[in-house]
Amino acid sequence: MSEPVQTPQTFTPRVFSGIQPSGGLTLGNYLGALKRFVEKQDEGGETIYCLVDMHAITVWQDPTKLRHQTREMAAGFIAAGIDPARSILFNQSQVTAHVELAWIFNCVARMGWMGRMTQWKDKAGKNSENASLGLFAYPALMAADILAYKATHVPVGEDQKQHLELTRDIAAKFNNDYGVTFFPMTEPVIEGAATRVMSLRDGSKKMSKSDPSDQSRINLTDDADSIAAKIRKAKTDPEPLPDTLDGLKDRPEARNLVNIYAALAGMSAADVVKEYAGAQFGSFKPKLAELAVAKLSPITTEMNRLMQDPAEIDRILGRGAAQAEAIARPIINEVYDIVGMIRSREV
């Protein structure tokens, strides 16, 4: 019996990240993810971006809405600057390597690891007995998403950092169990002034597409008037902007708007408070609204144009899936060899 081939401890620089198409894209998705995804295209190495529709169905989704949201999200990626000629863009369910590797990782990961996941506790809550097995095993599928491509870097928000740590644990245990150096220790990439954009109605909560209040978020499908109106109505406090970031301590809504301005303008939050020191929010908000409209309106316009041709979006996703499959399939086949599965070598 031949022994598994042990790969060298060098890995192709490769960025992977994904977003669930379980709702519309928000300003939080743009600043916390899409904007950075676009920047990664210029930093060298391969970039792979995935619409993780298999993750979406860990809670029930209306099939018609899921298809629409997947196409709309693809349009948002492209409109934000993801170039399908430079990055691989696809939806997860078209590449079976994800679920194949996820099953193997289900057998590597431990129940205790999954039970400690903060998002599992938050989403399942007191009703965990009625939550889906898929929701519980979600982190193993996320690890498979990443490691099916041996991705070395993953841009994520702070809320996903724990899942990245679990991905590293799974990779390390697989390598140790089988005596190989096969999977990389993927590095999370967390950066930027607004990696965690908060609700416009409550600065202690993340901006979310699932929030029942549409006023809590800016959607990438919002028109210019809606964007400006939501910023004008955003919750703040009566104090003026300070001249240092220390002055924003215990002022979550104020800090959130400063962070959003900084991220949209490509400035540091410290430079924003320095520029607007002493200003009341009555004068700061219109400046922020003007900036947000200037940055987001072109994206909305391009998304609307792309959504007029869903067949072309499907073709783009299909081409991306073929490219992703070409990378993942040899990796998955080698995994099967390592764990002892018999695979036909016939063409």
Image (cartoon, helix red, strand yellow):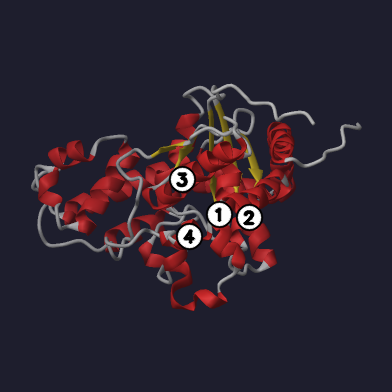
Label pair 3/2, CB-CB below 8 angstroms: no
Please report whichever mark, 4 or 2, sits nearer to the chain's N-terminal start: 2
Q: What residue type is labelled 1?
A: Gln
Task: Give the percent coordinates (x, y) of residue 184.
Answer: 53, 32
Secondary structure beneath label 4: helix
Q: Is residue 327 above or below residue 208?
A: above
Residue designated by label 4: 112
Amino acid carrying label 4: it is Gly
First-in-chain label (1 vs 2): 1
Circle 4: is it few (<14), some (14-19), or many (20+) Cα within 10 Å?
Answer: few
Distance from Cα at disc 1 to Cα at disc 2: 6 Å
Pointer 3: what residue?
164
| Residue 17 visible in rendering | no
User: Helix, strand, or loop for circle 3?
Assistant: helix
- Residue type beneath disc 2: Asp
Please name the residue shown 32% across and 45% down the image: 194
Marks 2 and 1: in contact by CB < 8 Å? Answer: yes
Disc 4/disc 2 C-alpha distance (Å): 26 Å
Label 4 close to label 2 by CB (< 8 Å): no
Between 226 and 49, which is closer to the camera in this rendering?
49
Q: Distance between the residues labelled 3 and 1?
A: 16 Å
Q: Which of marks 3 and 1 is nearer the N terminus?
A: 1
Q: Which labelled disc corresponds to residue 150?
A: none
Residues packed near mark 2 inside 10 Å, few (<14), some (14 to 19) or many (20 plus): many
For the N terminus, the quadrant is top right
- The residue pinned by badge 2 equals 53
Q: How far apart are marks 4 and 1 (CA)?
A: 25 Å
